[in-house]
Amino acid sequence: MKRKKWSELEEQTLLTKYSNLLNSGTLSKLKTREKKFKPIAEHVNSVHHLQDPVHFPFKWSWRDVSIKVQNMRHQYLGVKQKIRTSSNEFNWKDGENHWENFLKYKEVFGDVELDVKENAPSNDVVELCGDDGVLGFGFGIDSEELEDDEEDGEDGGKKSMLEREERRKEMELCMEKRDDERNEEIEMKGLMLEERQMMWAKRECEKRLRLEREFDEERRQRMKLEEKWEEEEMEWRERLVNMQIEHEKQMMQMQADACQNQTNLLGIMARLFCQFFGSANDGLGGGLGTLSAQVLQNLQHPGGLSDGGKPDAGSPSEFL
């Protein structure tokens, strides 16, 4: 199987994309290695592999990008070791002769002191794997071999390569443990958040049901009250109508009684008048007696008068 190897152009694209994410502040917001390096891998693949799979046959994953970033750091330190002069100064221009992207790496990640590589003990894993990642750069190490193009320095050798490999494996175990703990913490927080959301949703549902029940109860009470008001209004109207009818009856009865009393009074007065004037024995008294009796009869039976108050044609001649 052909070994996967990065080209200089792919390295340059990786460094440029990483620099853009770093300068925009996007990289600092991403908390896991996958979220940090997956956008970079997708960008490199879209620029090279998808456009020209013949010259760029490899499709890189986010793990490949993470390993490459760490390998480029070792490569940078190796080239820097080579360009160091006898006076402990560095011929920076000569760095691109050893590695084309040497100065580009320095521009993105800054200079790295050689003392960090040479003096850091191999068993100081906890210090190297701090909160900011490996050596403060926020990179992770995956369990894959270093690339063939890694520089070992002039005094490198097989022993130095084995020590570096052992140190890399220790850091890898530290990072894996740290990622597991972080994933477990995130998972627990997610479960707690989900439980809180479920509890909140349950409380909201109970509150909504309680409000609906209260609203239904209030509506039933209002309907009962309205029905009661309607019944009382109908009863009141019925009593009012009955009182009005009874009042009209009483008024009619009072009018009838008044008419009857007037009729009786007139009859009494007529009899008294007849008796008073009818007691005389002369002819005038007899005529008045006859007239009084006739008047009394007409008063009691007013049919003797026409509608205009005039006597009928069949009335007695005494009225003439």
Image (tube, rainbow, N blue to C red):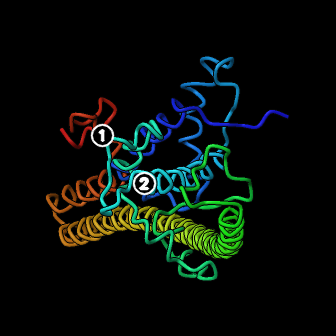
Relative height, residue 265 to residue 94 (above, below)? below
Q: Position of residue 153 (x, y in %)?
A: 54, 56
Q: Which residue is mark 1?
A: 316
Relative height, residue 77 to residue 12 (above, below)? below
Density class for disc 1 (Cα within 10 Å; few <14, some 14-19, many ≥20) is few
Q: Which residue is mark 2?
A: 80
Give, as a three-letter code, the residue at label 2: Lys
Q: Between tags 1 and 2, which lies in front?
A: 2
Q: Quadrant of residue 156?
A: bottom right
284 left or right of 118 in image: left
Q: Position of residue 88 (x, y in %)?
A: 32, 63
Density class for disc 2 (Cα within 10 Å; few <14, some 14-19, many ≥20) is many
203 or 253, which lies in front? 203
Image quarter hosting the C terminus: top left
Can the viewer see residue 206 in this picture? no
Can the viewer see residue 102 in this picture? yes
Q: Quadrant of residue 317?
A: top left
Taking the spot 36% from the left edge, 53% from the top edge, the residue there is 25
Taking the spot 50% from the left edge, 39% from the top edge, the residue there is 14
For the residues labelled 1 and 2, the Cα–Cα distance comes to 166 Å
